[in-house]
Image (spheres, coloured by chain):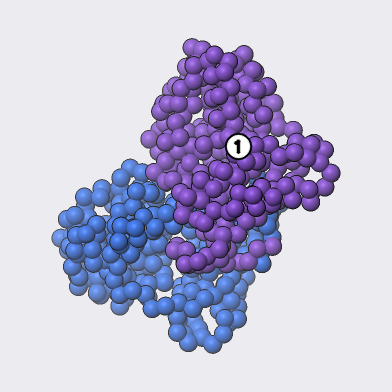
Chain colours: A blue, B purple
Amino acid sequence: MIPEDDRGLLLGDGLFETILATDGRLEHAEAHVDRMIRGCAVLGLQPPAREAALAAAERALADAGPGAGRAAVRLTLTAGSGRGLERPPGAQPRLLASASALRKPAAAVTLATAAVRRNESSPASRLKTLSYLDNILARAQARAAGADEALMLNTRGEIACAAAANLFWIEGGRLYTPVLECGVLDGIMRAQALAGAAAAGTETLEVRAGREALDRAEAVFLTNSLVGVQPVTALDGRTLGAHPLAVELSSRCR
Amino acid sequence: MIPEDDRGLLLGDGLFETILATDGRLEHAEAHVDRMIRGCAVLGLQPPAREAALAAAERALADAGPGAGRAAVRLTLTAGSGRGLERPPGAQPRLLASASALRKPAAAVTLATAAVRRNESSPASRLKTLSYLDNILARAQARAAGADEALMLNTRGEIACAAAANLFWIEGGRLYTPVLECGVLDGIMRAQALAGAAAAGTETLEVRAGREALDRAEAVFLTNSLVGVQPVTALDGRTLGAHPLAVELSSRCR
């Protein structure tokens, strides 16, 4: 239980991470905690101690019981207690950790472009913050359009990401993904996919690109920490094919 | 205390209202509750019962002790418990109410334009949601620039609002404020100011206008439920004067 004057609850003032655990082992836990610490610097929050945050994640996983199969460990850091837009001086951030069982991810998903856009003018667009309502609304719009997940453009109309994943596309043998400045999270699987593709000899480009770039794409896939690499089989009703590079990255990125 | 799996905490999934109480009496409580209920329709949340929400606000005020002076009663409605972007079927929203003493508002404020913009592509930009981090960041930017409050433009560069207030300006004897579609809250004091100005024989216009419109303004003021009408004495370093209409509206809008 957390107090009713917690700024995470009152104003979405804080950050979170979702860490995959397989068979009782956390995956990329250090990278997740390091990203949370970098996010604290952006938001002006006192960061958690690295070892304490890692220990909290391990403890939540152990408390959840026998470690077979897949689980998600969520670390939540709120700005602590205090009302009003301005944080009270000396507010102590609150770190929470919890684990929950995770179903096998869908083998592939369909996308629909959401009307809600990523607000790349805000530093929050590049962080996993507790103010996540726009992503909830984008997902709901995609579901209402009959798709599984949303394609979110930013306010300039550039491709940004999915509601809960980074987005990649392949065209002419090259791998493309939006630059972080488009308003996207510096995803841990995103970095893995970029490195994996480069290791496989594929040219990778971080770009600013309009929605029409996806009409020329041979394949599209999503990445996030819980699903790894997830192929997109249709975008706004247009069928998309599989691609050997996506298949290869699926096995490299875990 | 609230449970750690509350979606208000986890994802900023919910709404709030801040109601002024003076000498133990709630001001415009029905209008606040009705706005929360309208917001629920936009977000797809089951709305609270009107009478129950009003009673919760009254009870929070009574519990806070003797009713002399000013207080703020906050109603918070979260989407209930549940992880993930999609709300679990049958999730029960959670209604919280609390009261806190309120200091006398500043007689006037200075503004600085924030880099963080209102995301008018999102329905959340027209609601008081629990995903309020962009407003926190905009306020922090204004404070870092030496001002009291932020002027927020929307992503098209149009004037939207302050971080915690609606915004008005006066030019050529007319009263201007951004249309709601610019990404602004349908403020209760905003409506009072528009009605008050019309009653005083002043032409009022809800407009889309770029930042430069404020360079021509004779006076600028803010409105919100807790401060009523609050004059702006400087914007980005340019001194702004008082105006008889703002003074008159100060006494009309409470």
| Name of the residue lying farthest toward the left | A172
Residue type highlighted by circle 1: Arg
| Name of the residue lying farthest toward the right | B66
Tell me the quarter of the image containing the C terminus of chain B.
top right
Locate residue B1, reporting x and y percent.
69, 62
Locate residue B77, reporting x and y percent.
59, 54
Q: State which quadrant residue A52 falls in.
A: bottom right
Locate residue A134, reporting x and y percent.
44, 52
The total number of labels drawn is 1
* Residue at 20%, 70% in the rendered image: A242
As drawn, A44 above or below B27: below
Pick whichever, A3 or A54, lies toward us: A3
Is B181 left, or right, of B232 in this rendering?
left
Pick whichever, B238 or B89, lies toward us: B89
Whether residue A233 can be seen here: yes
User: What is the chain identity of the residue bearing mark 1?
Assistant: B
| Name of the residue lying farthest toward the top | B172
* Residue at 45%, 62% in the rendered image: B85
Question: Which element is circle 1 on?
Answer: helix
Pick whichever, A228 or B107, lies toward us: B107
Identify residue for label 1.
B143
Q: State which quadrant residue A70 falls in.
A: bottom left
Whether residue A174 can be seen here: no
Is B198 left, or right, of B156 in this rendering?
right
Is A171 left, or right, of A228 in this rendering?
left
Is B116 left, or right, of B196 in this rendering?
left
As drawn, B230 above or below A85: above
Locate residue B187, reporting x and y percent.
55, 35
